[in-house]
Image: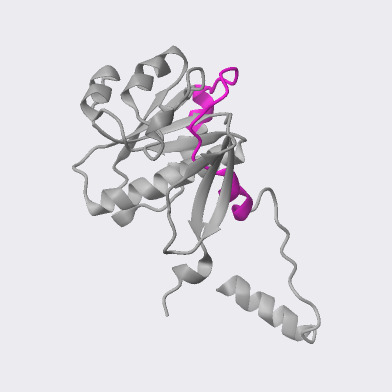
Amino acid sequence: MADNYLERRMDEMRGGKQKTIVKRVGQTLDTLLMKNRSCRGYQADAPVSEELLKRMVEVNTKIPSACNQQVLRFRLVTGDEAAKVHPLIKMGGALPELHLPFAGTEPPAYIVICCKEKETKLVDIDLGISAQSMLLKAAEMGYNGLMIGAFHREKLKEVLALPYDPLLVLAVGKGAEQIRLTEIREDESHKYYRENGVHIVPKVVLEDLLIG
């Protein structure tokens, strides 16, 4: 508020003729949101390092946390270990006939999000904030990802020797798919589909999201 007050006072002193110019540095949020598409196929020749995953997880030291509980913990999976996770996840629930991911396009890395405590509404709030923030970071660095909620929890916990229950799995890599958004009205089908090899994702238009 103090900064805004000073800006207003300076503007008044100049007779209100000059306006504060805000310079944007780097990619805008809108750009990152468009890049952050759910990707179900990855380039086999583009490995993901543990350091890159750490940079993604690092956003959790800056983002909000419900009641500031900060109970989420993260297991990084890279290299040959990723092969242990491949058979334990399911992708493309709306396209079961495709059996995604296609052979040779499996994710090269994962971040398994766990929780130190019992899952609650507050934990789920944190989970959404954390997952979205990490994938936006991935998009900023030129990578793609996918939130995976369909996986064998007990088997994953055993295979990775997790001390806590896994809540969500993030796939990370360089995307090998073309993805496009298309506008729909709220009463139209929300189901994503593929057309001529392009993954189409319907999104409800702004007018139908607003109440009143």
What's the colour scheme? one colour
> What residue appears at the point 44 percent right and 64 percent down from the top-left corner?
186
Front position in the image: 95 or 82: 95
Q: Position of residue 10 (x, y in %)?
A: 73, 79
**Count of marks placed on residues:** 0
Quarter of the image where one finds residue 13: bottom right
Farthest residue in the left direction? 118
Q: Residue at x 59, y 44 (%)?
A: 35
Q: Is residue 30 above or below residue 81?
A: below
User: Image height check: is 58 above or below 29?
Assistant: above
Residue 84 in percent (x, y) is at 35, 16
Instruction: Check residue 49 for magenta coloring.
Output: yes
User: In the rendered view of the protein, which quadrant contains the C terminus?
Assistant: bottom left
Question: Outermost residue, top direction?
Answer: 80
Q: Quadrant of the N terminus?
A: bottom right
Picture residue at 29% right of the left edge, 56% below the top: 67
The residue nearer to you, when weighing 167 against 118, is 167
Decide if residue 61 is in sight here: no
Residue closer to the observer: 187 or 134: 187
At 45% from the left and 20% from the top, the residue drawn is 78
Counting from the top left corner in percent of width and height, residue 155 is at 23, 22
Specify whether 132 is left or right of 196: left
Is residue 131 in sight in this rendering?
yes
- Where's residue 128, x and y in %? 37, 48
Q: Viewed as shown, does residue 19 lie left or right of 147?
A: right
Hey, which quadrant is residue 163 in on the image? top left
Q: Compared to 170, does 32 lie above or below? A: below
Q: Nearer the viewer, residue 98 or 3?
A: 98
Q: Which residues are magenta?
A: 29-54
Magenta residue check for 19: no
